[in-house]
Image (tube, helix red, strand yellow):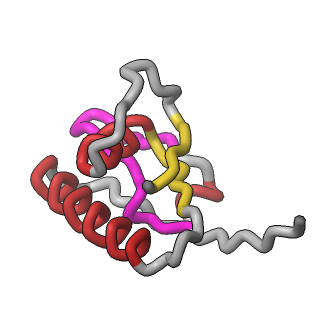
Amino acid sequence: AHYKEKIKVDRRLGRFFTREERKNPGLREETRRYKPYIAEHSQDFNDRMKELHKRLKKRRDESHGQEIWVITHALIIKRMMKKFHQKCDNHIKAVASYRVQ
């Protein structure tokens, strides 16, 4: 079978930077091109995660059985899996993927 994957880079999947990390985030040029959220407060990050959950749930519901994979940082994966009521291993790698079910 031949699969034609649609890959979308979404900066809203980015991680949270601590106050100390914001001073020198140490991002590669390739990452900087996507304009990641660096200077955001924890509440802004939480709001972004809530919106991400709504968007992924809508996309899942409209996908007609098409699989949706999210590749991002462990903290975001853990939050999304919890919101989608999926079992989450506490030892997720720093960057990993999960399937929206």
Magenta stretch encompasses residue 20: yes
For the point 45% across and 55% down, the residue is: 100
Q: Is residue 22 visible?
A: no
Where residue 29 sits in the image (x, y, percent)? 62, 56
For the point 10% across and 53% down, the residue is: 43
Q: Quadrant of the N terminus?
A: bottom right
**Residues shaded magenta:** 9-26
Magenta stretch encompasses residue 90: no
User: How many discs appear?
Assistant: 0
For the point 51% across and 54% down, the residue is: 70
> Image quarter for residue 51?
bottom left
Q: Is residue 47 visible?
A: yes
> Image quarter for residue 4?
bottom right
From what the image shows, is residue 79 above or below residue 34? above
From what the image shows, is residue 73 above or below residue 34? above
From what the image shows, is residue 9 above or below residue 89? below
Q: Quadrant of the C terminus?
A: bottom left
Q: Residue furthest top?
A: 91
From the viewer's side, name the closer residue of 6 and 32.
6
Q: Is 75 left or right of 97, judged from the image as shown? A: left
For the point 54% across and 38% down, the residue is: 96
Q: Residue furthest front?
A: 65
Where residue 6 sits in the image (x, y, percent)? 67, 73
Q: Is 74 left or right of 33, judged from the image as shown? A: left
Q: Residue furthest right?
A: 1
From the viewer's side, name the closer residue of 26 and 6.
6
Q: Is 79 left or right of 74, judged from the image as shown? A: left
Where residue 88 sits in the image (x, y, percent)? 37, 31
Q: Is 35 left or right of 79, judged from the image as shown? A: right
